[in-house]
Image (cartoon, grey):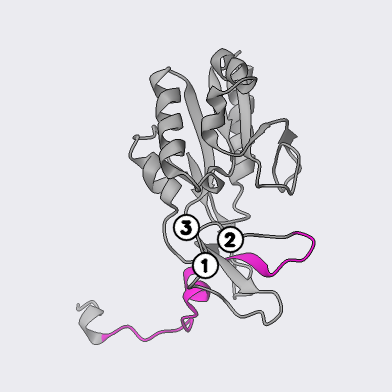
Amino acid sequence: MFVGPMASGKSRALLQEIEAYEARGCNVVGVKPLVERRDAGIVSRSGLRREAISLQRLGEMALDPVRSAIEQADVVAVDEIFMFNEDIDDTYKTAESLLRARKTLVVASLDLSGMGKQMSVVSALLGLGPTTVTCTEAICDTPHESDTPATHTRIYDTNTKASIRDGLPELVPQDPANPTYGYSPVCRDCFFEWPEQQAVPASYQQTA
């Protein structure tokens, strides 16, 4: 499982993992959510890409004609799995069925929503005990004295540029032709709009 904020290389890590499995002779099937319409297939910001099956629900893997490809696969790689959030139970049960069938499941997902809460899909999949969880890193979009790791994905109004941390669903609808919201990777201070230099309360200061 690869998790992190936007622009942190999750899709790149997923594609590199796919290449490693294929180099070992494994049959890999890529899957992506139908709602993600920016690209055809799985595509990283660095330019890596491969074909993938687009599904409305993850459970559609059990339906023809997708089922045949899944049954023949050794590895199922799912990008942007957090977008399959309309039916968490369906996503969880599908992931569970793949693991019970002794398939290797590799997924990439935002870890936190734009509201700063752990994605429900991620919480559910963690309950299945992934072998590894890799946190990918981005750099905060806000200028700092030095590169600062991004921990969150900020959502903002494209007109006012004001941050939005309340009142939106986990999966925020996006119209590429007329975007209402913008997105950027930011550090914790920028996400919560904390001052960069905060005095440490005396009760938390270390004593000699």
67 relative to 179 in the view: left or right? left
In the rendered image, residue 3, in percent from the top left (x then y), is placed at 50, 47
SS type, badge 2? loop
| Residue type, mark 2 in image | Val
Name the residue: 42% across, 17% down: 101
Magenta region: 176-201
In the rendered image, residue 19, in percent from the top left (x then y), is placed at 64, 26
Q: Distance between the residues labelled 1 and 2?
A: 7 Å
Nearest to the observer: residue 146 or residue 134? 134
Disc 1 and disc 2 in contact, CB within 8 angstroms: yes
Of the numbered discs 2 and 3, the one sitting upstream in the chain is 3
Single out the mark in the foreground, 1 or 3: 1
Q: How far apart are marks 1 and 3 (CA)?
A: 13 Å
Single out the mark in the foreground, 2 or 3: 2
Q: Across the whole image, how many numbered discs are drawn on residues?
A: 3
Question: Does 6 appear in magenta?
Answer: no
Q: How far apart are marks 2 and 3 (CA)?
A: 13 Å
Name the residue: 44% across, 46% down: 121
Residue pointed to by mark 2: 172
Q: Please identify the quarter of the rendering in which residue 69 is found.
A: top right
Q: Please identify the quarter of the rendering in which residue 175 is found.
A: bottom right
Q: Residues within 10 Å of mark 2 (few under 14, many from 20)?
A: few
Q: Please identify the quarter of the rendering in which residue 29 is found.
A: top right
Question: Does 200 appear in magenta?
Answer: yes
Disc 1 and disc 3 in contact, CB within 8 angstroms: no
Residue pointed to by mark 1: 168
In the rendered image, residue 207, in percent from the top left (x then y), is placed at 20, 79
Name the residue: 58% across, 57% down: 138
Residue pointed to by mark 3: 112
SS type, badge 1? loop
